[in-house]
Image (cartoon, rainbow, N blue to C red):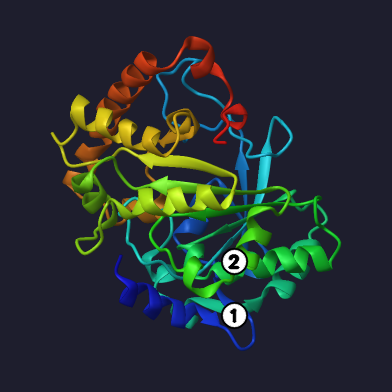
């Protein structure tokens, strides 16, 4: 883990004295042009709608595409309120966010306290039941999630609102800046889940996807294992894009082995994401990236083939929310 990079960005997006974080302004961005995005909260938030969970890879049948609610009651249309931290330690080529919103530049955002964000959220009469702390990488500032929970409790919204957090598994700074009691408070907070994304299935695909050469693919497994040990309610994603010809059955098999070393059920609670052409992503794609979209399809076939060897039909068909990691 490149701690210097993480700390540099953290210094840009966190005002610790005033307990404020830098939130991206989404108005007039490439991201705002995507049809799944509805900008709200004066430009500093967006509503995301999940209608069919089509970003989950599948073999185009009911068995391999399942919805994911992360504790939310089952609905036909799942809506979430997203706020994005304006900083990230990686630059994934397929990211749906404009790169300029990931640099911690206050020109493209504004500092907010969590009380102020919850006030913005509360003013929307049609507000979703889910607040999604996204980015960027929100866990560069672990205090953001903590403070959000404290504000929700302050405004009597505890157990009424779900708090989702997106994590790229790229930093262990939470254990440096928060106390054991604060981490325990977050892990036990009702309706809180974390979606942790593995950026590839081996070191080569990790470097290809993130653009990182100084960081190790292994850190993601270490961070996930520590979060699970703390008692957080975790889900996993994996992106399967890689350079043309990189994927083999053995590499996918080894990746699944490593997930099962953390917990035997973890592959069942890991959702392969299908990388699709978001507006910001298209602006930076090249021919190598385009070929990797076919590579992810091959990788998913290997993924599903391997899962059918390890789990029964009933286990494979079980909803993600019913897979336990305890």
Q: Which mark is residue 180?
A: 2
Give the distance between the C-alpha atoms of the residues marked 1 and 2, in whole angstroms. 27 Å
Quadrant in which residue 9 is drawn: bottom left
In this view, 29 is above or below 200: below
Task: Name the residue carrying label 1.
Answer: 111
Q: Position of residue 293 (x, y in %)?
A: 27, 36
Residues at circles 1 and 2 in contact by the CB criterion of under 8 Å: no
Q: Position of residue 270 (x, y in %)?
A: 45, 35
Q: Is residue 51 left or right of residue 212?
A: right
10 Å crowding of disc 1: few (<14), some (14-19), many (20+): many
In this view, 24 is above or below 62: below
Query: Which one is in front in this view, the residue at disc 1 or the one at disc 2?
Result: 2
Between 271 and 259, the one lying in front of the other is: 259
Q: Is residue 279 visible?
A: yes
Quarter in which the C terminus is drawn = top right
Mark 1 residue element: strand
């Amino acid at each position: 883990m490149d701690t210097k990079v993480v700390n540099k960005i953290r210094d840009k997006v966190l005002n610790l004295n005033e307990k404020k974080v830098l939130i991206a302004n989404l108005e007039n961005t490439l991201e705002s042009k995507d049809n799944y995005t509805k900008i709200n909260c004066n430009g500093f938030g967006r509503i995301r709608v999940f209608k069919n969970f089509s970003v989950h890879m599948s073999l185009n049948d009911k068995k391999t595409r399942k919805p994911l609610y992360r504790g939310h009651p089952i609905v036909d249309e799942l809506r979430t309120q997203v706020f994005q931290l304006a900083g990230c330690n990686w630059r994934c080529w397929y990211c749906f966010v404009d790169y300029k919103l990931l640099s911690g530049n206050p020109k493209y955002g504004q500092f907010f306290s969590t009380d102020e964000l919850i006030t913005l959220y509360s003013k929307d009469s049609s507000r979703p039941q889910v607040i999604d702390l996204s980015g960027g990488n929100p866990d560069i500032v672990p205090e953001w999630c903590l403070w959000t929970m404290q504000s929700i409790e302050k405004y009597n919204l505890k157990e009424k609102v779900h708090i989702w957090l997106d994590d790229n598994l790229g930093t262990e700074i939470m254990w440096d800046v928060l106390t054991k009691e604060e981490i325990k408070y977050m892990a036990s907070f009702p309706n809180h889940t974390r979606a942790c994304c593995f950026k590839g299935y081996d070191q080569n695909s990790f470097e290809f996807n993130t653009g990182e050469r100084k960081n190790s693919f292994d850190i993601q497994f270490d961070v996930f294992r520590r979060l699970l040990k703390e008692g957080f309610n975790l889900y996993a994603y994996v992106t399967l894009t890689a350079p043309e010809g990189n994927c083999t059955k053995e590499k996918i098999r080894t990746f699944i082995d490593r997930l099962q070393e953390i917990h035997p059920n973890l592959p069942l609670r890991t959702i392969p994401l299908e990388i699709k052409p978001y507006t910001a992503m298209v602006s930076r794609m090249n021919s190598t990236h385009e070929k990797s979209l076919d590579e992810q399809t091959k990788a998913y076939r290997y993924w599903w083939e391997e899962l059918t060897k390890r789990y029964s039909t009933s286990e494979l068909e079980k909803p993600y929310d019913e897979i336990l990691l305890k």
